[in-house]
Image: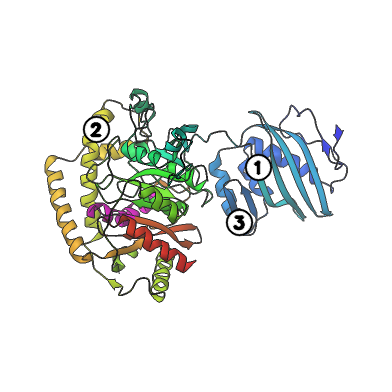
Amino acid sequence: MDAAADGSRVNPDSPAVPGAVPPRTDAPAGLLDAVEAYEAALMANDVEALDAFFAPGPDTLRGDASGVLVGHDRIAAFRARRGGTPRRSIHSTHVRAIDDDHALVVTVGAPVRGGRGQQTQLWRRDAAGWLIDVAHVSAPPPAIDSSVWRVVGTPLVPGALGDQPQRIDPLPLAGLRVAVKDLFDVAGHAVGGGVPAYLAESRPATEHAPAVAALLAAGAEVTGIARTDEFAYSIAGRNPHYGTPPNPAVVGGIPGGSSNGPASAVALGQADIGLGTDTGGSVRVPASYQGLWGLRTTHGAVDRGGLLPLAPSFDTVGWLTRDAGMLRAAASTSLAGDATVTGFVTCDALSALADDDVRAAFEHTVARLGDEGLVPALDTVELPDADGLLECFRTVQAAEAWAVHGAWVATHPGALGADIASRFAWASGFTAEDERAARTALETARAELEAALAGRTLLLPSASSAAPQATASAEENERTRARTLRLTCVAGILGAPGLSVPLLEVAEGPVGFCLVGPRGSDLALIDACERFARALA
């Protein structure tokens, strides 16, 4: 055992037995035994023992690169779903005694897979023994998080500036990094659609999708192809084959889908622009859950060539960014809409679909915008019944999804996870008459919505809640999904732009403030919300 410069003990040869802690003589009595027992419980994934080591109550803290968990119960819930930690041995242990009953412990681990990690803990002794009040874990970062990215490069595809290094006038997106959802053609790469079996049969694209090419022509570079839910038929952000991308805004929260990979890449700072799609909320929901700006464009306003469809009547291109300026710059590469935003309305029946705290935050924000004179002459309108809107939307979406992917799904049993497989099985049951009736109902609903809105912009929450925890039950997830889809389907039925802006915050995390504007008002919505954000800052 060697002595470090600070007097701590260092083991130059990692112990063969995980959990072995180098002996120390200057630690408070019993502390190192507790540290060793904690490490053994960690390696055994003994959840009950680990819970007992963390101090009870609402003030216990545990942090890592994903964020901070506050309270023993939230830490315990996180640990229960984690499924253990990678095997490691202890390289060194450093103790700084504060007094006889408090000490700071830094343990450096040597994971079996390589690298070095560390955990820093504030230990406290009470009548029950030594307990952890605060812990922070630093694990060796993966080179590529495969739950976020399918393939990456440095860059994967250079922007136009890379082809013209002597260019004097800067391109608007010069050097900005793009995460492309795994539905768009990127020359030289196949589209996987979030399904490994589909990827295995796909051929590399010979040219970029127009939406990709527009960003490259403006100087942006494609960092990589990012994950999506299977065939984009979800708003949750889970993928049973590749895992669930992290949500840095809500520790343990799902990222939202189906543009989950691009959203997480932007929220994590690994990309500046996420290129995604939105059929039933697939840009707006991840933007809401992760505190991003996310635009669903006017239906048909952006060329959808080179895009793997889900439901062509509703599929749109969209972008996710961390701020308004970046979003407008990205959108301007493909949009030139000149419609304006003139009046604003809300619908009590729609905002009532959100959780109580979300609804309260939404109403408070609307009131503040009114006080600032930014939503003058705000009216409350009655819209068609939300259940009816969702029913016709989902039926047409399902019929089109089956028409696009049904033959492949039917000949590849077992290729999809249980949730999406059941969704396609449900979609397969609609008859031609069912579809015709739903399309008639959809046209009626569109006309009624347009008449009620009368060219004005609808304000509503982007989602019914903050990001649900990944530990939520299937029944709880389905309830949340159904309420959120009742909010998001309005823009899909109208074929209108929908912009989610991170203006709301509840205890569980961020929630988007959504604007559904007249068709063609995409850029005007961004400009209006930039004013909103400045006024509320």
Amino acid type shown at disc 2: Gly
- Residue at which label 2 appears: 406
Mark 2 to mark 1: distance in Å? Answer: 45 Å
- SS label for mark 1: strand
The crowding category of the residue bearing disc 2, from other C-alpha atoms within 10 Å (few below 14, some 14 to 19, many at least 20), is some
Residue 233 at x, y percent in the picture: 32, 41
Q: Which residues are magenta?
A: 475-498
- Residue at which label 3 appears: 71
Q: Is residue 242 visible?
A: no
Q: Earlier in the sequence, mark 3 or mark 1?
A: 3
Closer-to-camera residue (9/201): 201
Q: Is residue 129 magenta?
A: no
Amino acid type shown at disc 3: Gly
Q: Is residue 489 magenta?
A: yes
Mark 2 to mark 3: distance in Å? Answer: 46 Å
Q: Give the image quarter of residue 2.
A: top right
Q: Earlier in the sequence, mark 2 or mark 1?
A: 1
For the rendered model, the colour scheme is rainbow
Amino acid type shown at disc 1: Ser
Mark 3 to mark 1: distance in Å? Answer: 20 Å
- SS label for mark 3: loop
Q: Is residue 113 visible?
A: yes
The crowding category of the residue bearing disc 1, from other C-alpha atoms within 10 Å (few below 14, some 14 to 19, many at least 20), is some
Q: Residue at x 13, y 51 (%)?
A: 440
- Residue at which label 1 appears: 138
Closer-to-camera residue (162/298): 162
The crowding category of the residue bearing disc 3, from other C-alpha atoms within 10 Å (few below 14, some 14 to 19, many at least 20), is some
Q: Residue at x 16, y 59 (%)?
A: 447
Q: Earlier in the sequence, mark 2 or mark 3?
A: 3
